[in-house]
Amino acid sequence: MTATLDQVADKTFDYVVVGGGTAGLVVASRLSEDATVSVLVLEAGPPNIDDPAILTPAAFGSHFGKPHSPPRFRKTIRADVLSTGLVERDLVVAPKSTSFSTTVPHSPTSTRLAWEKLGNPGWNWDLLKKYYMKSERFIPPEHKTEEMSPLTVAYPITLSGFEGPYHQALKSLGIQRASEPFSGNTKGTWLTPVTIHPTERVRSYSTNMYFTPNAARPNLTVFCSAQVCKLELTKGDSVTATAVEFVHEGKTYKASVKMEVVLSAGVVMDPQILEISGIGDKKVLEHALIDTFVDLPGVGNNVQEHVYSGASYEVKPEREDEFLTFDCLRDHEELVKQTELYKSGKGVFGMSSICMTFVPLASISSNSQALQQRLYDSIEAGIVAKKFSSALQKQFKVQLEHIKAQDPSCELVLTQACSSKPNLPEPKKKYITLTSLLNHPFSRGTIHVKSNDPLEPPAIDPHYFEEEYDIRTFVEMMKFNRRLAQQEPLKSILTGKTLKSFSSDTRTDMIYKGAELNPGLAYYLKAQCNTTYHTVGSCSMLPREDGGVVDTRLRVYGTTNVRVVDISIIPLHIGAHMQATAYALGELGADMIKGSIF
């Protein structure tokens, strides 16, 4: 179903799409609807078509670290300005498509799509919502319950039993159900549909949604195991891409392009490819011994990421039979049993983490006003000290408006398993993990090439917690989850014992007042937090003078025919899992290329 080398090398195509992930396959399938144009997709990884570990819903993440997984990079957490310091360690980054992700496809709060406020006319909820809908098809559940509303895609095949108790405990702390979370208001808690086909019992993702049904098109070519190195460029009044160079089985080849190159390689590789090609900050390029075609300082900057951490709570032995968790999959015999159960639509392989909660900090913390005042003071001091560029000040202004309006900024998720760190869970026991996700960081990171070697991984510096408000918000979420575990009916289900969490650190019990930082929780979070693979911003859609990389038509500044179509163009992070937005951007980007919008 995929192409051979001789069908691609030294051939010419109208469009070359770099990256066969979520957005890339959407763009390619839509462009190839026009039978008069030819479309090539170059994908760095293998095809993995019909791989059971991808198709099985609960097997998400099992590919990471395997030979057939996406390219993996390491990023080092850097020291920050807080007195507690940041624990020195590496994090592994794997560019994440819908084949390797969790199965949560929800849209953000409408006000968070405020990109037009940053100089992108027309880029708002009204534009994006129709593209969210275009990529989704809802299948109503067979097991209807008051916990569900028929919204989009489908609900999991199997429920864990924790869904009701979790929402009841939240309600006791003032968190209400979100009535229409897919209509632009995610404030509250709900059960999210997931990208799982309930009757075929397989993951629904970009390959089987967009590629497989169209694989027979003679004008659609997909070539895998092709690591794109650079774009061949010619320079006139503007720069034009004439070919794409790639490595396959250790040898370098190229494919020529007549019309456009579309970068959909993800937040890590998009800036890498641009910089290796000579598009980026001239200082960065000169340091890497790369000739500059377009001096574009925004490439690889403005990187923002969701990070998460959680605490795992043990289920009472006498209540274990009432609930399903993924913990059983650590036992080989149980794994075999669950595999057989899934063939008939039963067992934990049909489950997913679907308990979503999005709330403003004020809903979960009595310290919110004090923390916000500290944030205002910190930003004002940074402006006076010329710490922040005028472009970043514009972003901060929008973020502060969201805080003042009490838009959802904190995400809480229940996972039916022990998934916190660093210790191992006890065999044969069941757990839940109450997870906190920092969705709207004020800190900004960078991704840049280290040399002119296209196969050398880039330098990734996330700048986690550089702005103090980020770690303080994170701590408040963890404190709320600790209180949540003590609320009925969760309290009667759990033993009260936490595993692999902050409670083992005596510093967490230090007395503190008001908005003073709890050093034990902060230390734990810095030591154990992880990426959600929701990184955005490395090719931000902003005015060029504000550090933008692409314009409102997603075209790279200074070029005639290079676009970026994936979540790396997002200039200001949204409070949502990124799958639905990646699909929407792919659909929207395809329409832009075809000239049917803007």
Image (cartoon, rainbow, N blue to C red):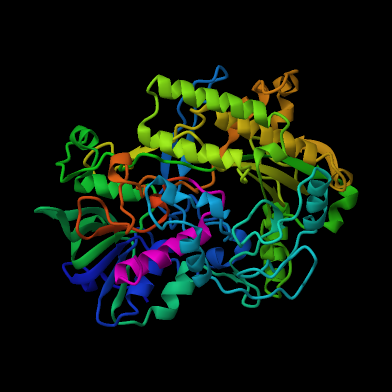
Span colored in magenta:
573-598
Q: Please provide percent x and percent y for residue 194.
A: 62, 64
Q: Please provide percent x and percent y for residue 116.
A: 42, 51
Position of 99 relative to 379 (above/below): below
**Does 275 sit left or right of 85 as displayed?**
left
Q: Please provide percent x and percent y for residue 568.
A: 39, 50
Residue 514 lies within the magenta run: no
On-image quarter of the N terminus: bottom left
**Does 246 sit left or right of 55 as displayed?**
left
Residue at screen point 28% across, 44% down? 544
Question: Quarter of the image holding residue 444?
Answer: top left
Front residue (pair 522, 71): 522
On-image quarter of the C terminus: bottom left
Front residue (pair 101, 248): 101
Residue at screen point 33% across, 73% down? 31
Q: Please provide percent x and percent y for residue 193.
A: 65, 64
